[in-house]
Image (cartoon, coloured by chain):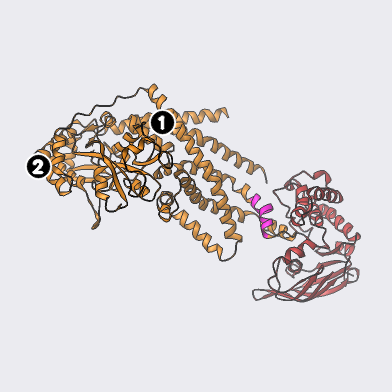
Chain colours: A red, B orange
Amino acid sequence: MIAIEGLSKTRGAVPVLSAVNLAVAEGQVMAIVGPSGGGKSTLLRCLNGLETFDSGAVSIAGHALAPGGHQPGLLERVRRDVGMVFQQFNLFLNMSVLENVAMPPRVVSRVPPEVARERALALLDRVGLASFASARPATLSGGQQQRVAIARALAMQPRVMLFDEPTSALDPAMSAEVLDVIVDLARGGQTMVVVTHDHAFAKRAATNLVELVAGRIARCGPAATVLE
Amino acid sequence: MKGIGMRVLSGMIYTCVGIVVAVGMALAASAEELDEVIARGELVWAADQEGGGPHVFLDPKDPGRLTGFEVELAGLVAAELGVKPRFQQGQWDRLPLLLGRAADCVINGIELIPERRRDYHCSRPYFAYSLQLLARRDGPLDSFEKLAAHGPGGRWRVGVLTGSAAEIVMRSRSDLELEVIGYDGTIDSLEQVQSGVLDAAVMDDCIFNFYADRFAGLRMVGRPFGGGLYTILTAHDTPRLSAAIDEALGTIIADGRLKALYDRWDLAGRQQVLTLRDAAEIPMAGRRSLGQLARESLPLLLQAAGMTVLLSCAAFPLAILIGLCVAIGRLHGPAWLRPLLAGYVEVLRGTPLMLQLYAIFFLLPKIGLALPALVAAVAGLALNYSAYESEIYRAGLKAVPLGQFEAALSLGMTKWQALRHVIVPQAVRLVMPPVTNDFIALFKDTSVCSVITVIELTKRYSVLALSTGRIVELAIVTALLYLAMSWPLSLVSRWFEARLEKSP
């Protein structure tokens, strides 16, 4: 589902990623751990084109990303198949919770409004927030907002989900409710890449794990083995 | 709500009382009059150099020097008083307002009419003019009589100088099929006849004689009609100065210097002097009662206020739309477009609105694009304010967190979808208070549109003040009308701000 070969990126003269090779099979959950500034988030953002890279190749959900700029339309196609959840939730503040989840399929994939709405309500129900459908995002707790963000990404029915430190901005109780949702997704066979600091969670949810240190893969293998 | 209303009302009353007191003090200040002029050694005479030749204009050979037959006349009058002349610039239709404050007298083709005699002291006449109808040489208007029936395009569009006798005469001719349009500049109407926007212009014959070579495409239609006399204006409360000026004029006429002056300017000196000698006394207009003033003026002021509202409400949404597009283009458009849009903003923000209105209304017809005054006014206001709005929206767009944009993109939206559904709606909400503020500013800036013949509230006020002489009363009513219209806007602005503060 995901194949990364020789991916390198520098920022100015500083190498951020150096010849990273990585493969994630369908249904696998890959956890990326490592110290801050190690290139975890940058690697993740290269996978859906939020950042460009200097050399190497990325194949994800059947799309090929090359170094440098991308041809018009390619990134939109990639991102339709690759959902992303951010550390800071980034819910759209100008719309209700339901609209946050229903609008993207309607606008991007031309899903009929009623279908998008039904799908959004079902997803909100799945993350336990159906009763907050008409609420404004800012009135929700951090954990609730992150669960809405997950529902929003799922609404596009992506083949791959990327999580960029989804619980770093949350206290332990709220983290737990978000992690439960992610574990539930993993059990459902969703292909996922999760950048996280939380080793316990990585052990519980991930099938494979890599540790990125200074832009290089330091350790790599089945989650349970690597974290022993 | 009631508390705020009372506070504002009492504020308005204090303001009005303040205006009355200030005007009263200004009128009282000119008591010493003639002695003061002599002690000063200068006679300050007011005119509008924009009014043009042959009265007062900048010498084409030496553009730093003022010339014209009235410049020389002022010199002769001042010499008779034993002082030097000093020129004071003012806008023509508001020159009399300078009396008693910035000027001792007004010498600038001021026609001797009953309304002027009521409000100011008018000297004995110093020049006789006739009115002349002017039209395109190749146009359909070839006789004055044709004005009595509709022209090819409906009523004849005739331009006049605002506040001039030509305006008063033409507006009073209900027997003619006319649409009379007032211009602030003397030869603006000639330009507009030449470019085909107007069918004809009416002005003092001496002005057209002076500019005839420049407007070779125009011709005089019919004989001169409805003539009158020019007078020197002084304030009512400077009787000694007025008498001294009258006496000076008498001397200059009697000893032949006025004839020599007019002959030098090719103004038929002998005929002038003969006419002036036989000039009949002009009656004085009556002063309207307050009730009559209200009955006559209020409907006109309300109608003009309607024009102010129309201009604002038509121009501002356009300004917002253009401004938003410019802001988006500058932040997200192609690289080649960004400097062009930056230039657009700088040019429109860095040049005066009045100049832009002038360009749209007077210069575009020269390249074949003649816009009606109302359309030109709306376009000018919209373009000018779009520059300011674009800067506000640019700030608003930049204030929306980058994460919102990334989240939208990560869902597969294009840049434009992200802007339309996520970024712009948030930016619009953020900038609501400054945008409402600008609406109030534009609302008041509509008064500038009078330079291109649109009669809105301020213009209507100055025309009414001239014709009725009730300057203070009408000023108060006009100010109250402006307040009554802008105050609700302020409330809306505050409501938006309060709402914004409450929401996260």
B140 with respect to B333 (left or right): left
A176, above or below B231, in the image: below
Crowding near the residue tagged with mark 1, few <14, some 14–19, many ≥20 C-alpha atoms within 10 Å: some
Q: Nearer the viewer, residue A149 or B450?
A: B450
* Residue annotated with mark 2: B256
Q: Total number of numbered labels?
A: 2
Same subunit under labels 2 and 1? Answer: yes
Could you say where residue B136 lies in the image, as x and y percent from the top left?
Answer: 34, 48
Rendering quarter of residue B222: top left
Q: Identify residue type, mark 2.
A: Gly
Q: Main secondary structure of the magenta part?
A: helix
Q: Which residues are magenta?
A: B415-426
In front here: B275 or A140? B275
Q: Is residue A7 above or below residue B336?
A: below
Q: Chain of mark 1?
A: B
Residue found 85% across the figure and 54% down from its top: A176
Q: Is residue B503 positioned above or below B285 on the image?
A: below
Residue B476 shows which numbered tag? 1
Residue A172, how many percent across, how many down?
Answer: 82, 54
Residue B149 seen in this snapshot: yes
Can residue A82 be seen here? The reply is no
